[in-house]
Amino acid sequence: MILIGPPGSGKGTQAQRLEQKLGAVHLSTGELLRDEIAAESPLGKTAATYMNTGRLVPDQVAVKVVVDHMDRGDPDADYILDGFPRTRIQAEELDRILGERGLEVGKAVEIYIEDDVLKERLTGRFACVKCGEGYHKFFKRPEIEDVCDKCGSMEFDVRSDDMEETILTRLGIYHLETAPILPYYENRGLLVKVDGEKSVSDVTKEIELILADVG
């Protein structure tokens, strides 16, 4: 399953919830690329020059990080893809990658949400410096103020790609480069749309019903 939506639409949150419920592998290209950046790998250094300013990484970089991850994983795994594909070229490459493994896209789920709501969500996000656990100043604060629920660290930071100027760039790029892949899946009868402004639990339930129909 592919989760498609603009930054801040909740793709990562939904993928994590569904991963636990379905036993599938959550593959987040954003997280994989940030791991490469933290490791200061050649791929990470290339990715950083794009991600830190809100731009999409080149197609070949996104494809490589996905292929490398799949090659290291269980060949029989089901995947929930979050943040990939983001362009028509990546969508076509994904079909090729899956075809080589005897897999195919089951559903492409668009999580739709208005830009104004997205801006509010994104400008409030922050994360634990130590473990990367994500929070929001309005919607998800640590249970103990200034202490990470997951690891106990007291260091937090705002990701460079969640700065206001960068957010506007990311939204513009989504509408220009990623939204046009929606017809690619719609024409094949694979695209479904859910309302991303509903509660997290309600969105999860909608996606689960979609997957039940596939199964």
Image: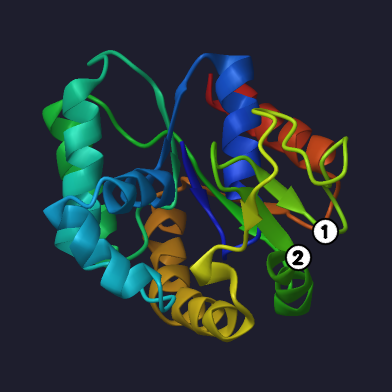
Count of picture labels? 2
- Image coords of residue 203 (percent x, y): 76, 42
* Numbered tag placed on residue 214 in the rendering: none
Relative to 175, say whether 181 is above or below.
Answer: above
Residue type of the residue flagged with mark 2: Gly
Residue 5 visible here: yes
Of all residues, the one furthest to the front in this rendering is: 154
- Image coords of residue 39 (percent x, y): 26, 45
- In the image, what residue occupies the spot 87% across and 44% down? 145
Q: Earlier in the sequence, mark 1 or mark 2?
A: 2
Relative to 203, say whether 175 is above or below.
Answer: below
Q: Quadrant of residue 104?
A: top left
Left or right relative to 172: residue 13? right
| Disc 2 packing (10 Å; few <14; some 14–19; many ≥20) | some
- Image coords of residue 156 (percent x, y): 65, 52
Relative to 49, say whether 102 is above or below.
Answer: above
- In the image, what residue occupies the spot 25% across and 55% down? 62
Left or right relative to 100: residue 197? right
- In the image, what residue occupies the spot 71% across and 75% down? 119
- In the image, what residue occupies the spot 35% across and 54% down? 85
* Numbered tag placed on residue 124 in the rendering: 2
Label 1's element? loop
From the image, tell me which residue sits under label 1: 137
Disc 1 and disc 2 in contact, CB within 8 angstroms: yes
- Image coords of residue 174 (percent x, y): 48, 74
Q: Quadrant of residue 52?
A: bottom left
Residue type of the residue flagged with mark 1: Lys
